[in-house]
Amino acid sequence: MKKPNQNLKGFTLIEMILYIGISAVILSALGTMVSMSYKIRARQQVVSEVEQQGTAMVQIINQTIRNSSSVTVPVATATGSSLTLTFTDVTKNPTIFDLSGSTLQISEGGGGAVALSNSKVQISALSFSNLTRPSTPGTVKFNFTISYTNPNNYPQYNYSQTFYGSASLR
């Protein structure tokens, strides 16, 4: 008579199914974490791009207004979608800020326009208000909205921010 071998080593079917199930749950959780990490990283890049572009444009507009000698357009107490400044340096006359499509641009001295924003963002709602009062240096208040360009309409790329600023002539 044969004696059953009590020292058989291996896994039972139930143990294998259990191990595969646990592995699937762990891999699924890991995949979800990686996916969420990618979406968060993409969102942070979008926010950073919009904020960097907006901050740079606000600084350029502020500095240009402060260095100008007068505001031509819009006239005093009016609001417009473009800003025309004059300078004591005639090579910069006129300096104009306006939109070309969804790109903020500046042109100095009748030269070609230079884009201040890149193709990753779109500028809208550009507004300049001339707050100049009689017997005071010119003051201009401005605002614009920057939206991240999102051609595939992914939700993590939907972001816009409105920037405000004001500056007075020196």
Image: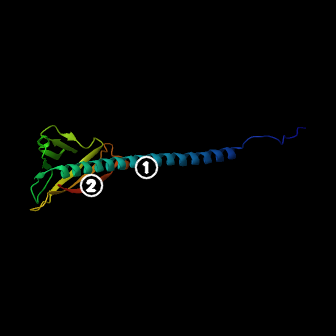
* Residue that badge 2 annotates: 163
Tell me which corner region of the image, top left, top right, bottom left or bottom right, holds residue 3.
Answer: top right
Q: Secondary structure at mark 2?
A: strand
Query: Nearest the camera: 51 or 148?
Result: 51
Tell me the residue at 33%/43% (across/down): 152
* Left or right of 160 in this view: 101: left
- Kindly check if marks 1 and 2 are in contact, taking CB atoms under 8 A apart as contact: no
Q: CA distance from mark 1 to mark 2?
A: 24 Å
Residue 148 disc label: none
What amino acid does circle 2 point to?
Phe
Residue 29, position as x, y percentages in the image: 54, 49
Figure quadrant of the N terminus? top right
Figure check: 141 above or below 106: below
Figure check: 132 above or below 33: below
Tell me the residue at 57%/48% (across/down): 25
Asked if residue 101 shows in the view, the reply is no
Tell me which corner region of the image, top left, top right, bottom left or bottom right, holds residue 168.
Answer: bottom left
What amino acid does circle 1 point to?
Ile
Asked if residue 15 shows in the view, the reply is yes
**What residue occupies the far bottom of the structure in this picture?**
134
Q: Secondary structure at mark 1?
A: helix
Query: Nearest the camera: 81 or 38?
Result: 81
* Left or right of 10 in this view: 146: left
Residue 112, position as x, y percentages in the image: 16, 37
Tell me the residue at 22%/55% (across/down): 143
Residue 45, position as x, y percentages in the image: 38, 46
Query: Label 2 neighbourhood size at 10 Å, few (<14), some (14-19), many (20+)?
Result: some
Residue 40 disc label: 1
Tell me which corner region of the image, top left, top right, bottom left or bottom right, holds residue 24.
Answer: top right
Query: Nearest the camera: 43 or 154?
Result: 43
